[in-house]
Image (cartoon, helix red, strand yellow):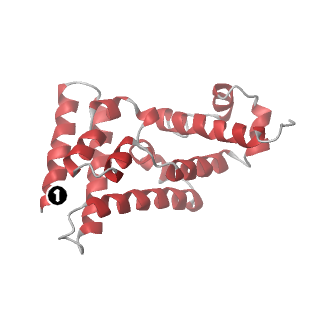
Amino acid sequence: MRYQKGQRAETHRHIIDVAARRFRQDGIAAAGIAGLMTDAGLTNGAFYTHFESKEDLVRQTLDAMRENSGGATAQAIREGVPPEGWLRRYLSPSHRDNPGRGCVAAALSAEIARHPEATRDVFRAACEQFVGLIADSLPADMPEARRATAQALYGLMIGTLQLARAIGPGPESDAILENGVQAGLLLIAA
């Protein structure tokens, strides 16, 4: 396939954007190359012009999501929103109900654990970046405990969101989200 100047990079980015949404929405295993390329408005043959394999697409997609970590929670943290505000943004019914636009860690952690080490390394870098962002937002009077608290808090956030998604929308799931917020606040205060 012949591309005009800049079109190849634009097409490459478009495929990654489609893959990012579909991976989070349906899971990596369930998102086949044919379906991804159809969603991108391209033929299957064009896939190998851009990626060596589906695993290469997974790695590049995870890396792009890390580079563009402009999710609502990360943005709130960067803007100095207090912890309760960004916890509520992450552990919200809207985030629960829209995995295709949400946190990659909550959507894909269990699946990524089964991927090759190179893919897990890209995922690990994204998680470490977000943990660092959380740590930097925690009270300055707890410098030694900030990173450990941030790791525990991120794990709590991911697990709470996964459980709420598994239960599905409704009062029980809403209570799980609220209890996650309260547990997160207790963890920060400890």
Q: Is residue 151 visible?
A: no
Residue 72: x percent and y percent? 37, 41
- Callout 1, which amino acid? Leu
Q: Quadrant of the N terminus?
A: top right
* Percent x, y of residue 180: 20, 44
Specify the quadrant that holds the C terminus: bottom left
Question: Taking 53 as reference, is 181 left or right?
Answer: left
On screen, residue 103 versus residue 2, left or right, reads left
Work out whether 157 lies above or below 34. below
The reply to whether residue 141 is in sight is yes
Residue under numbered circle 1:
187
Which quadrant of the view contains residue 12?
Answer: top right
In this orientation, which residue lies closer to the viewer: 53 or 134?
A: 134
Of all residues shown, which one is farthest toward the bottom? 144
Between residues 167 and 143, which one lies in front from this camera angle?
Answer: 143
Farthest-out residue, front? 79
Quick one: 73 or 155, which is closer to the camera? 73
Task: Give me the residue at 72% from left, 46% from top.
Answer: 51
Q: Secondary structure at mark 1?
A: helix
